Image (cartoon, rainbow, N blue to C red):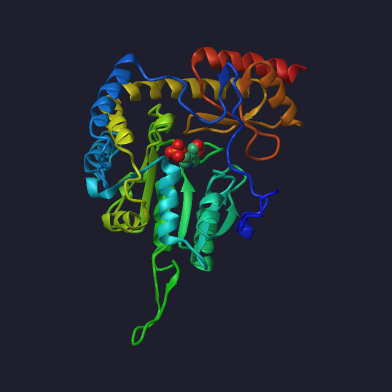
Amino acid sequence: MSANLPLRPDLDGEAPYGAPEIDVPVRLNVNENPHPPSAAVIESIATAVAQAAQGLNRYPERDFPRLRAALADYLKAESDAHPAPEQIWAANGSNEVMLHVLQAFGGPGRTCLTFTPTYSMYPEYARDTLTDYVTRPRREDFTLDADAAVTAINELRPAVVILASPNNPTGTALPLEDIRRILEAARGHGPMLGAGIGSPARASDCVVVIDEAYAEFRRPGVPSALELVGSANPHLAVTRTMSKAFGAAGLRLGYLAADSALVDALRIVRLPYHLSAVTQAAALAALSHREELMAQVASLRNERDAFVDWLRAQGLTAHDSDANFVLFGPFPDRDTVWRRLLDAGVLIRVVGPEGFLRASIGTPAEMERLRRALVAAIGG
Ligand SMILES: Cc1ncc(COP(=O)(O)O)c(C=O)c1O
């Protein structure tokens, strides 16, 4: 008998999100870190998880204070920011962190605004929280038109604006002046909050999320929005993840820094005990190796810059990238190029503007294989 389920009408015909999971020698399609954890990191994680296992009959720490303190400490070392542990929130990947933001601030009759091309999960957070999803285009070079963003915020009164910096799939980072202007425009331009008996309707602030999933890969001199976090900007949240630079995509640990009142709003919508004791223990152990893990980032950055130069030397357009991937093209038939690379054992991603492809930065050997496969794919 075929299923006769009461699926929400807006989910009818929707497919689960995800890039193809194809087992090939060189996987450069989902912006992972190509380096597996070192023996020392594996040993620390194994010891921490074994210890956590002794208490698995109990629920984990619900608001994980030790992990929040360790993440705050990491951000201090990584940027010019000084968040307090109460200004940190975490969940199973930054995807879940941003879903918490939409659960707390979005909802029916409210709008989430973003600027395309950008990360393709944003419409899903909006859909899943019954929030209207509205996009405006980035400029042709993928930078953000701050004037257009200000106009859109004034017009739409969105509950949440999400801006990826560096942006996926383009690699473009946002200047702090633009973020400051958007934060200013967002003040008092969120949804109107209902009038009550004796109290008039009032305008809320729109929450501005700067998605810095790839921030550790930014080029020297490119600032992080973390330095704007705090009581001066109570409507700003900056999200980060251990999935990319930290080389721990399998761990599922994303986090954000924001004023503590915003964090407290997220605590309302999280499920109790959403971060398992095993995740908390493994994340704490990985964070204790941050220097070693961050050393890899420098070599990936160099590899990225060399790849951009090489692509340009081939006569292709390669966009400047502050992330661990590069968007390049244009190809008259990008699907054929993608297929030829796959046949040569190299998986990249068909994403972004027509004619363009995106490749994550791999090890030097993987990049050499990509370059050779690309020359062959374009040549014939
Ligand atoms: C821009 C951006 N934000 C967020 C994420 C989510 O990362 P995670 O949920 O692994 O932290 C990704 C993943 O590719 C991304 O590209």
Q: Residue at x 32, y 46 (%)?
A: 273
Q: Which of the 4 image quadrants contains residue 293?
A: top left
* Residue 219: percent from left, percent from top: 42, 31
Q: Give x and y (percent) for residue 355.
A: 70, 35
**Foreground pick, 97 / 161:** 97
Residue closest to the eye, 307 or 291: 291
Which residue is pictured at 44% across the width and 66% down the height?
A: 190
Q: How many marks?
A: 0
Q: Nearer the viewer, residue 240 or 65?
A: 65
Residue farthest front in this picture:
1
Which residue occupies the extreme bottom position in the image? 198
- Relative image position of residue 13 (x, y in whole percent): 68, 50
In the image, 154 versus 7, the foreground residue is: 7
Relative to 216, is 297 above or below?
above
Q: Quadrant of the C terminus?
A: top right
Q: Position of residue 191 (x, y in %)?
A: 45, 69
Residue 64 occupies which quadrant of the picture? top left
Q: Up-down: is 132 above or below 77?
A: below
In this rendering, the answer to whether 372 lies above or below 184 is above
Whether residue 353 is visible: yes
Q: Is residue 8 left or right of residue 176?
A: right
- Which residue shows up at 25% across the image and 26% down it? 48
Q: Is residue 277 above or below residue 225?
A: above
Residue 175 visible? The answer is no
Q: Residue at x 42, y 19 (%)?
A: 36
User: Does residue 169 appear left or right of residue 252 in this picture?
Assistant: right
